[in-house]
Amino acid sequence: MHDALRRVFGFGSFRPDQQESVAALLDGRDLLAVMPTGGGKSLCYQLPAVMLPGTALVISPLISLMKDQVDGARANGIRAACLNSALPTEERAAVMRSLLDGELELLYVAPERFALDHFRELLGRLEISMAVIDEAHCISEWGHDFRPDYLTLSSIREIRPEIPVAAFTATATDRVRQDIAARLGLRDPLLVRASFDRPNLSYEIREKEGGDSQLVSILKEFRGQAGIVYRTSRKGVNDTAAMLARKGFRALPYHAGLSDEERRRNQDAFIRDEAEVVVATVAFGMGIDKSNVRFVIHADLPRSIESYYQETGRAGRDGADARCVMLFSQGDIPKVRFLIDSMLDEQERARALAALSKVVAFASSTLCRRRMLLDHFGERYPKENCASCDVCLGTREVTECTTEAKMLLSAVIRTDSRFGSGHIVDILVGADTKKIREFGHDRLAVYGAGKERGRVYWRRLIDELVARKVIARSEGLYPALYPLDGALGILREGQRVEMVRIAEKRREKPASGKVSADGLPADRELFDRLRALRKRLADEQGVPPYVVFSDRTLHEMASRKPSTPEAMLDIPGVGQAKLTRYAESFLEELRGRS
């Protein structure tokens, strides 16, 4: 297994959970794996597909990804192909001949193809090594992206009862996992729940200020690197993309309002490194497997913590360092609230408000970003300091607010935990409202006690206490604040409370080894030359540049400067097939440097 890992993929060791997953499939055992974006799930089935006799069948709903997945597998010397409605008739016929002749180790198909009676009948006659269900949550009606065409996959066990079945998903609740296992008829599957931690990603929140000039300034930090800027609206996408293009950035828009042809053209330009920035709504991302995205910027508030995690997860899929920056302003909240309030379904509004509350708490908190993200997904982060978020790197200045926290808690408790943030803030700043007079809240001791602080301060403190689980918001359309057990530590035990503001200067993550703080090799000039060579070879072969080599592999080449084929094989990501195909060109470039 380790020999095949080195020979095919060029890696000397497995990532967490990969070895157990590969071993299970090689032993003929079913597998149910929850692995986050960038967790290396494709290797978990591609490696056993190479080692086992027959063809591994991979069912995936992302047709736009299939060609890139096939190109990547072929670059590693794997005999791979795909079957979907986007293929020309002649290509489909050629793939079918290869399949029937037993020449394929890996076949990607769309679920609608599996639904065809003649295709399922064909599977009963072929030598199939395993069946792999990607995006397996789509088979569950409890999943966030249920697809009726996935229900036909339940017949896999009937058609080929003897082969292992592997189900992969990036995120799934216990209920969804149980539903996946039941619908696919998984038999005593190995259950893998990989960590949601992406240690190569750094997280940073910046106060939104300065409009276009602030975004331009941030992008200059990433000049020449690939990244995504997320905006909420189509207009925001169009305006930002046009502004960046005027400023000299190779930036393109992507949203559902563009024509299919323009979206495809812009996506392809980004994947092939012909555009450095895509400005997009959340419609962008599901159809790409670009491994060398070095940054993700949220110029507007994301819809939820889940959305934020998924969108930031599109950075650094090659394992090299990448940065995630969110621009946050309290002024964004009313804009989002306006959109939420226009929702007709009351339950949908309540869910959206709860999701917004968690995002605001995340952006406002003094707690480690990584710890908060993992906590949201039910995972405990074991370290005190992650050394890769703005809080842990000390880029946020701390101010004590214990007295103010006691005032706020007093206002919540003395109003019987019946009122929301807006009313509590009105009490603290001494607002003269009809509601305050009707309830007699102008007679409370804390009425007007915090007027010198202003509304923004108190709203931020509420968000901070929610993040610290000192108070919480009730469910429903009009959520009320109520105290949790953590409130006692502040009111009775004198526990210190702190709040932060963002410091002017960003403190960089400490550099390690021969890689600089921005994730690029110390020899940047050589790295750029290797990247230009990669682009030229990729264009000649009609594949995305990351299919040739990942940024991480180029980093290692630029740092180690191998001079022989044997030394090149020690570079992570250089397997036997890529050595044969590319070594001479890259060694020539490296020798030219020396």
Image: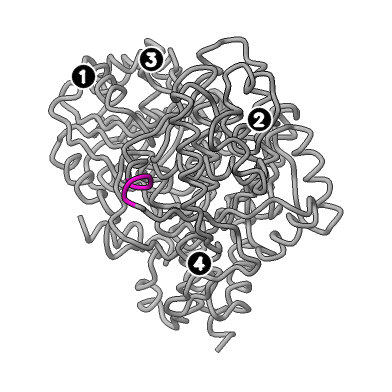
Q: Earlier in the sequence, mark 3 or mark 4?
A: 3
- Check disc 1 and report the residue beneath it: 185
Q: Earlier in the sequence, mark 1 or mark 2?
A: 1
Vertical placement of residue 300 versus 422, above or below: below
Q: Earlier in the sequence, mark 4 or mark 1?
A: 1
Query: Would residue 319 be found to the left or right of residue 272 on screen?
Result: left
Q: Is residue 491 magenta?
A: yes
Q: Earlier in the sequence, mark 3 or mark 2?
A: 3
Query: Would residue 357 be found to the left or right of residue 180 on screen?
Result: right
The residues tagged by marks 1 and 2 sit, at their Cα atoms, a distance apart of: 42 Å
Q: Position of residue 563 (x, y in %)?
A: 45, 83
Name the kind of residue labelled 2 in the image. Val
Element carrying mark 2: helix
Element carrying mark 1: loop
Name the kind of residue labelled 1 in the image. Gly
Q: Is there CB contact under 8 Å for labels 3 and 2?
A: no
Q: Position of residue 554 (x, y in %)?
A: 50, 69
Q: Residues within 10 Å of mark 1 (few under 14, many from 20)?
A: some
- Check disc 2 and report the residue beneath it: 336
> Along the line of sight, which residue is nearer the eye, 444 or 50?
444
Q: Is there CB contact under 8 Å for labels 1 and 2?
A: no
Element carrying mark 4: loop
Q: Residue 141: which disc? A: 3
